[in-house]
Image (cartoon, rainbow, N blue to C red):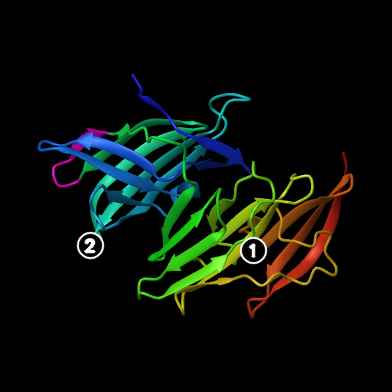
Amino acid sequence: MKKLFLLIVSTIFGILMHAQPITLKYATEMKELRLKLYYGNGGKGAFIQYEGKKEIIPLKVNSYRLDTISQGPDQPAHHYFVWDEMVNGKLNGTYKMMQMQNVIVDPSYIRIRDFMHFNLELVEEEGGPDGDDKYLLHGAMISFNHFYNNKLLIEYPDGKKMSAELPFPDSPDAAMQSFIEDYNFDGYDDLAFTIPDAGMGVYNMFTIYLYNPKTKRFNQLKEPDYSKSGCSCLCDVLTNKEKKLLQTGCRGGASWHQDLYRFDKTGILRWVRSRELGED
């Protein structure tokens, strides 16, 4: 029988945002171990930290599958995660779990040295979530908060740090979301933070930090010239990997507008074309 563990989540922009970190426990031959698991969309940016330990252990996405069909219409999507636990660059174990809406299903851990299988249990934390979240991306630790402040901290492997203030929702009921995606199509994942628009809250405004593999730093994407655009923001950003285009969308009055952008050879984001999607 599957074990279903309730997890605080909300769905914004089609991606699950969960209370971070998730605390899990399992028993070995000698003792009970507890760990905290952090992860972003598609399982990216994941790492674990064992209770009482300062060290963090990177998790590499082995596989991620999103199932929106097999459960039937109007049913929650199923997110299947498999991570490889990497210690000193070598495979040490494998974590698996499935997430659907506000439920975690069958989290488990396989220890590679003896292929011992452990069923994990979710630890119920006292009090509500504090909103703190972290990712490990390109060796850098990214720290921010979904609910209560707009502080961004990036700590690089060489000891250097970068701090910034992110746009923050006007409404106390709104939350800042985060995404890990290759927004400039250079093969390296970047960071995006989103908040609902200040008007009707029907679309999300993006702040994007691009990763530079040469400098090994994240730099905020300079917004494009909006003089020909239907929207004056990077809103509801989607990537078209085949055509290497960024698609954005916003609502003005009764109509929705869509803009397409492309990065030029110098890395500047340029407007390509726009269209109106019609009235409600």
Figure quadrant of the C terminus: top right
* Visible residue check, residue 185: no
**Labelled disc at residue 83:** none
Q: Secondary structure at mark 2?
A: loop
Q: Position of residue 190 (x, y in %)?
A: 53, 63
Say if the magenta span includes residue 113.
yes
Residue position marked by numbered label 2 in the rendering: 88
Q: Position of residue 167 (x, y in %)?
A: 64, 60
Q: In the rendered view, does 228 fall on the left or right side of 72?
A: right
Does residue 250 lie above or below 124 as drawn?
Answer: below
Say if the magenta span includes residue 255.
no
Nearer-the-camera pick, 240 or 57? 57
Magenta region, residue range: 112-119
* Visible residue check, residue 166: yes
At x 43%, y 49%, the residue is: 39
Gap between marks 1 and 2 measured at Cα: 35 Å
- Check disc 1 and give the amino acid type: Lys
Residue position marked by numbered label 1 in the rendering: 244
At x 79%, y 62%, the residue is: 232
At x 52%, y 32%, the residue is: 101
Q: In the rendered view, does 119 fall on the left or right side of 206?
A: left
Q: Secondary structure at mark 1?
A: loop
Nearer-the-camera pick, 257 or 49? 49
Q: Quadrant of residue 219?
A: bottom right
Point out the residue furthest to the top here: 1
Does residue 58 lie above or below 147 as drawn?
Answer: below
At x 72%, y 65%, the residue is: 261
